[in-house]
Image (spheres, helix red, strand yellow):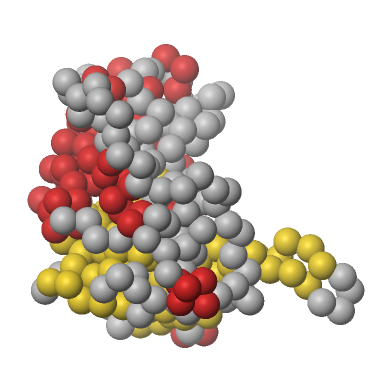
Amino acid sequence: MSDIAEITVEDMVIDFPVGGGLFRKQYLRAANGVSLTLRAGEALAIVGESGSGKSTCARAIARINMPTSGTIRVDGAEITDPGFRQSQRDYAAKVQMIFQDPFGSLNPVHTIRHHLARPIRIHAPKLSSTEVDERIIATLERVGLSPAAQTADKFPYELSGGQRQRVAIARALAVGARFILADEPISMLDVSIRLGILNLMDDMKRDGIGFMYITHDIATARYFAERTAVMYVGHMVEWGESDSVTQSPRHPYTQLLISAVPEAGIRKTRERKAKKAEIPMRTPESRGCPFAGRCLKVMDRCHADMPPITQLQEDHYVRCHLY
């Protein structure tokens, strides 16, 4: 498979069985009507609370979970087509995931060299041992782990959290990843370390690598990603160019996320942006806007009808009856 230029998700729905009887199963709708595009050399941030479906969408793109309906296309080719199965290993090499916990994603009984050598041998079996070792050293240096030869011989517990996350990034790069699905890659790191990881990923964008950046923090989304999509309970509620979404948020849920970002020197009580309520569990039978139960501007039709997509600017969209 040649280098991927674009991954397009259209109207993706993902349901998970959660119980029910023998003749009627019950399903949780984890993603509903999700449409997005990942482009080489750019980052798309997916922002939302826990349970909003961010990681579920990433796992579907990585072919860990298959969507219930909708399409995922790679440069126009549908990844669920039977003919695409011949390229599964190539696709896995080009589309890699890195996870929130950099220690949990590494085997503590193996060296860093092993963590990089094994996927290289799987995806590039014709390389000699010398060539594999050269790629390991070059990749570790690329992610800022120097001296690389000494780092390669260490075990995960001998590295800091930031260094372990750099190893996870190196493991993706070592097999030739062109898209990296980063599932909250900095949330478990010290604040002083986070900027270094974001800057590393920003440098990788200049090399043509595309990112899906999953985060709770809308502030870092604006810093790192060219485009931002806000998700709530499996639905995309607002998306577009990052500056537009974060500077002029229109959906009440996006406004809630922005209001939660701390500001230095501000001690006064913030204006309440949402009602206190449980995050709803959506099913295929659910109707209306998923945020209706918490929204301060809710109308009767919000409970009955899903809002249509409204284009606010050239690259700024929202799903809200207010617009």
Residue 164, image quadrant: top left
Up the image or down, 154 lies above or below 93; here it is above
What residue is shown at x 30% (from left), y 61% (from top)? 251
What residue is shown at x 20% (from left), y 29% (from top)? 263
- Where is residue 258 drawn, in percent x and y? 26, 44
| Residue 67 appears anywhere in the view | no
- Where is residue 206 drawn, in percent x and y? 10, 51
Up the image or down, 9 lies above or below 90; here it is below
Q: How many marks?
A: 0
Name the residue at the top extreme. Answer: 158
Taking 127 as reference, is 88 left or right? right
Up the image or down, 282 lies above or below 173; here it is below
Comparing 106 with 237, the one in front is 237
Comparing 292 with 230, the one in front is 292
Residue 320, image quadrant: bottom left
What residue is shown at x 58% (from left), y 57% (from top)? 280
Taking 32 as reference, is 98 left or right? left
Q: Looking at the rendering, in which quadrant would you find the N terminus? A: bottom left
Residue 166, image quadrant: top left
Q: Looking at the rendering, in which quadrant would you find the C terminus? A: bottom left
Comparing 182 with 166, the one in front is 182
Comparing 2 with 251, the one in front is 251
